[in-house]
Amino acid sequence: MRAHDGRPRPVCERCGAVTYLDPKLAVAVVLQRDGKVLLGRRGPGARAAGKWSFPAGFVERGEKVEDAAVREVLEETGFQIELGELLGLLSSSGETVVLAVYRGTIVSGAATAGDDLTELGWFSADALPELAFPHDFEVLERSGQQPVTGNQ
């Protein structure tokens, strides 16, 4: 590690090549039904295990971002969706992940928790389970839900 462009960065001791540690892009999808949002309980090996969040995951290198969102929903919930509007890009200082949040509409499928989720549930903004990430509240607000923030 050596200072380069005002930040500590990995630098090759032999040739001086600088490695720029780029952020990782992830996607999340908000699915709503009857005033409730679909959340999944994160499994034992996942970050924030046991807490709840939106269907989400990483975009693979070379994958179209929108295709990753559709794929992650199918893998985690069993639902085929039609991807809707981009609700926003969320990032914060010190966080290595940038999150692209979309709205989605269920087209077909049966609710089946998969990938790194252990269960699925539909929740209203006034009866949320323990959410996995601070940005989940911003996601709810951007989706038009008015979350009760007491269960952060």
Image (spheres, rainbow, N blue to C red):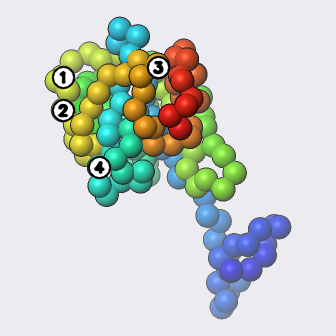
| Residue with the mark numbered 3 | 125
Tell me if mark 2 has few (under 14), some (14-19) or many (20+) residues whose alpha carbon lies within 10 angstroms of its own: some
Q: Distance from label 1 to label 4 (Cα)?
A: 22 Å
Q: Residue 15 versus residue 101: which sits nearer the camera?
A: 101
Q: Position of residue 24 (x, y in %)?
A: 53, 52
Q: Amino acid at mark 1?
A: Gly
Q: Is residue 40 above or below residue 44?
A: above
Q: At x 34% / y 12%, what residue is drawn?
A: 33
The extreme right residue here reads: 6
Residues under numbered marks 2 and 1 in contact, where contact means CB atoms less than 8 Å apart:
yes
> What x and y, as percent, mark residue 64?
44, 38
The count of marks equals 4
> Mark 4 belongs to which amino acid?
Gly
Q: Quadrant of residue 3?
A: bottom right
> Where is mark 1, residue-wise?
109
Residue 73, located in which quarter of the rendered image? top left
Q: Which mark is residue 112?
A: 2
SS for tag 4? loop
Near mark 1 (Cα within 10 A), the count class, few <14, some 14-19 or many ≥20, is few
Residue depicted at 41% across the width and 18% down the height: 124
Q: Which mark is residue 43?
A: 4
